[in-house]
Amino acid sequence: MQRPFNVLCAWVGVLVLSPLFAAIALAIKCEDGGPVFYTQRRVGQGFRVFRLLKFRSMIENADRSGLLTAPRDSRLTRLGRFLRKYKLDELPQLWNVIEGDMQLVGSRPEVECYVEMFREQYALLLKEAPGITDPASIAYRREDQMFTFEGREEQYVSKILPDKLRLSLEYQLHRTFLSDIRILLATVCRMTV
C-alpha cells in the first residue's frame, strides 16, 4: 500500500498546488530570468543516483561556491529566501515521488560525497527510497541558521549530519503507516510557521 499511497498523494498535491506552482515559476522567471527549476544529483534507494528537483532559490551556478547554505547567504535570491523559509522550494519533489525516486516520508536524500562519509548508516537507510520529510527534517527545519559562516562543512559533517542520521535511523526502526501520517501533518503545520 505504501507506493500507491505515495503516488496518489503526490498526484493530488501536484494537481491541488498547480496554481501555486505556476505562480512560483512566474515569480522566479520575473526576478532574474533564470531557470525555474534546480536539479542536483542525490543518492537514492540502493545507492542509485537520481536528480532531485527543486524550485531554484539561488543565483545560477551557486553550488560552485559550496553545497551548504549559510545564514544570510548572498547566493540566495530575494524570492529564494521566501521560498526556503516556507519550504516551498521543495514542492517539485512531489514529481520525484511520482517517478519513484522518493517517497513522502523517509530520510532526506543526500549528495554523494556525504553519503560516502557515512556509508554504513546510509546502507541501512537506503534500503528504502529517501523521502521529502522525516523527524530529522522537522528537527533541522532551519538548518541553515545553525551554521556560522566559517567552517560550514566541518559543522555539517561533525555535528548536524550525524544527528540527522541518528534521528532517521531511530524513526525507520519504529516506523508505521500512522507515524508517517503524523510526520506529514507535522511537516505541513511547520511550513506555515
Image (cartoon, rainbow, N blue to C red):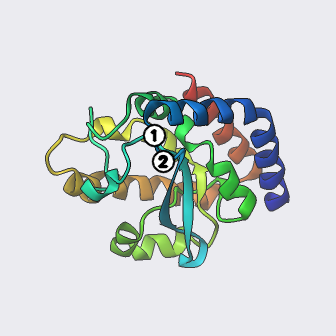
Residues at circles 1 and 2 in contact by the CB criterion of under 8 Å: yes
Q: Out of 34 and 17, give the one closest to the viewer.
A: 34
Q: Out of 14 and 139, give the one closest to the viewer.
A: 14
Q: Residue at x 51, y 35 (%)?
A: 28
Q: Which residue is mark 1?
A: 139
Query: In the rendered view, would you say 149 is above or below 167?
Result: above
Q: Out of 112 and 3, give the one closest to the viewer.
A: 112
Q: Position of residue 47 (x, y in %)?
A: 53, 77
Quarter of image, res 141? top left
Say how many tags the image has: 2
Can residue 130 be seen?
yes
Q: Position of residue 169 (x, y in %)?
A: 51, 60
Q: Residue at x 39, y 35 (%)?
A: 142
Q: Out of 72 and 154, give the one closest to the viewer.
A: 72
Q: Residue at x 73, y 42 (%)?
A: 181
Type of residue at label 1?
Ala
Asked if residue 140 lies left or right of residue 8, the reply is left
